[in-house]
Every structure is written in structure tokens, then in C-alpha cells.
Image: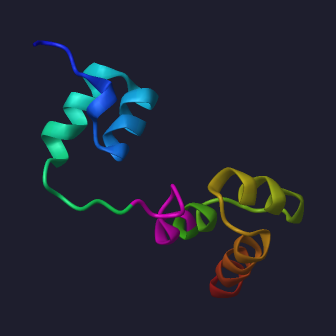
Amino acid sequence: MSSIDASVLQPIYRDLYDLLGEAELLKVFEYFRGAQVTFPVHLYQRTLVSQAIAQREVMTSDYQTLARYYGYSERWIRTQARKENKSQ
């Protein structure tokens, strides 16, 4: 047997199989085998997003765009931009 029998996979592995395919599932399985993995709600790390906002000049019209891009609230983006303006 060289191929995976998807009908008897654990539910999480079945989801990954459907999402990624057989070859990628095997890579994930070998890399994380036995580990308990928790995925953060946000794709981007909060401290690094804050630094990225600090490095650019943010206009009030950009808040909504940045919030959608980074997956944080517009209020949080606005707060980070204000903190940076005060420290300058």
C-alpha cells in the first residue's frame, strides 16, 4: 500500500488531506507528528504589525484598509498609529 486510505484517516488529517492533498498531508504529518498544535486567530503577530504601522505614515483613510489586511480591528490600528504619533 503506497497510497493513503482517506476513508480511515483521523478527522483532522482528513481535513488536511482534503485541503492540501496527499503529498502535503504527509509532510505536515511527518513534521508535526505527535505535537499538539494550536493556530492563532490572527495570521499576523500583533507586535510586528504594530512595528509595521509605526514605520509608515498612516492616514486616517488607511485605517480600514490596514484593518482588513492585517485582520485586526480598525480601532486597534488607529490606536497603534496614535501611539506612534505621540512618541515622535
Question: Quick check: 15 left or right of 74?
Answer: left
Q: Where is residue 8 in the image (x, y as percent from the top left)?
A: 27, 33
Q: Where is residue 12 in the image (x, y as percent from the top left)?
A: 36, 46
State the quadrant of the N terminus.
top left
Q: Position of residue 78 (x, y in %)?
A: 77, 74
Residue at image location 26% in from the left, 20% down from the top: 23
Quarter location, residue 22:
top left
Q: Against 3, is 75 above or below? A: below
**Residue at the right extreme, as displayed:** 61
User: Is residue 75 part of the magenta span, yes or no?
Assistant: no
Q: Magenta residues, as a range?
A: 39-49
Question: Quick check: 65 left or right of 31?
Answer: right
Question: Quick check: 61 left or right of 65?
Answer: right
Type of secondary structure dominating the magenta stretch: loop
Residue at image location 72% in from the left, 61% down from the top: 57
User: Is residue 45 part of the magenta span, yes or no?
Assistant: yes
**Residue at the left extreme, as displayed:** 1
**Residue at the bottom extreme, as displayed:** 86
Q: Position of residue 48 (x, y in %)?
A: 48, 65
